[in-house]
Image (spheres, rainbow, N blue to C red):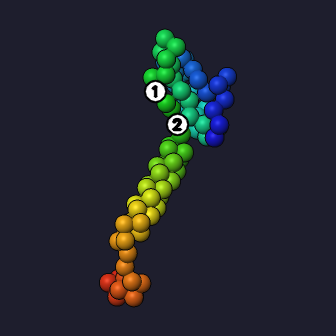
Amino acid sequence: MQTKFSEDIIPLSDLKVNPGKVVNHAKDTHRPVLLTSRGRGVAVVQGLDDYERIKEELEFVKAITQGLMEIKEGETADINDVKKKLGL
């Protein structure tokens, strides 16, 4: 999902003129569209499926990081205790 600067950065005024085109571009290319105002970035338009996928991936990475930190700090549990706690 690499940004194509010639296609994925548009002025906010283009969104106002044709919002469907901008939304469909983000959805169809699976790339976020950066909206600008007076040459500065102000917002991002992204397809819902891509947003949800990225959000899930971020939560997964956070959970892995948390687990690794717990292991590093010695916060581990015996597998048999975990199975017992889960009723397995």
**Which numbered circle lies on residue 60?**
none
**Which numbered circle lies on residue 46?**
2
Picture residue at 35% right of the left edge, 86% below the top: 81
The reply to whether residue 28 is visible in this rendering is no
**Disc 1 packing (10 Å; few <14; some 14–19; many ≥20):** few
Percent x, y of residue 74: 37, 71
Lateral position of residue 66 relative to residue 44, left or right:
left
Residue at which label 1 appears: 43
**Disc 2 packing (10 Å; few <14; some 14–19; many ≥20):** many
Picture residue at 67% right of the left edge, 22% below the top: 6
Q: Say which of 27 and 63 sits in front.
A: 63
Lateral position of residue 11 relative to residue 66, left or right:
right
Q: Quadrant of the N terminus?
A: top right
Percent x, y of residue 71: 41, 69
**82 is higher (above) or lower (below) than 72:** below
Number of numbered discs present?
A: 2
